[in-house]
Amino acid sequence: MTRAYLGLGSNVGDKAAMLAEAVTRLGAVPEIRIAARSRDYRTPPWGDTDQDWFLNAAVAVDTDLTPHALLEAGLAIETALGRVRERRWGPRRIDIDVLSYEGAKISDERLILPHRFVRERAFVLVPLEEIAPDLVIGGETVSEALAKLDRTGIEPLE
């Protein structure tokens, strides 16, 4: 099995329930085993800021799926949970991103690994640091990348 890291986000409806259901569905895929899950973090919107706050989390998975098959599994779960893509960086019931897949460097029309924005987004790195502070992405650890970013407004959900 290969270790991969996924980022999850929601800012429509019952955000915590949506993240929990996404993790449950990921774990129900026969080729995916949930190895670790961060707490949920309340985060301000990023990119398109005229929308409700987000809840974000990260999960580590052990998988026999290829990177592209893991992406497709995440997209299928998004669709099953009612994700509609209306605008870039807009509101979403659920978002599941493949952030890193052990040893994989991919850049094609469907998938870029490691995720091209992971080191620029504190809302991704804060939950990821909780479960994988020493994970190296782009030549630096998650903790090192996060130390360069503003964490304002990112709080663990109690």
Image (cartoon, grey):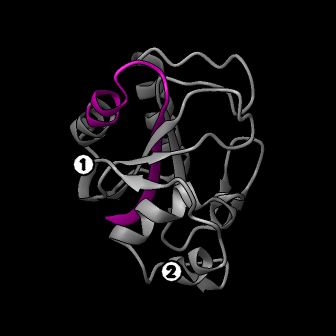
Is tag 2's residue or tag 1's residue first in the polypeptide sequence?
2
Q: Residue at x 42, y 78 (%)?
A: 133
| Residue ID at (74%, 22%) | 87
Residue 18 among those drawn in magenta: yes
Decide: few, some or many residues near mark 1? Use Cα within 10 Å; few <14, some 14-19, many ≥20.
few
Q: Residue at x 39, y 73 (%)?
A: 132
Q: Is residue 23 magenta?
A: no
* Residue 138 visible to an observer of this rendering: yes
| Residue 83, horizontal then vertical, whole percent | 51, 19
Residue that badge 2 annotates: 143
Q: Which residues are magenta?
A: 1-20
Residue 119 percent coordinates (x, y) = 65, 67
Q: Position of residue 114 (x, y in %)?
A: 63, 64
Name the foreground residue: 60 vs 86: 86
Q: In the rendered structure, which amino acid carries the disc numbered 2? A: Ser
Kind of element beneath mark 2 = helix
Residue sticking out furthest to the front? 152
Q: Quadrant of residue 52?
A: top right
In the picture of the structure, the residue carrying the numbered disc 1 is 158
Please tell me which residue lies in front, 42 or 29: 42
**CA distance for labels 2 and 1:** 23 Å
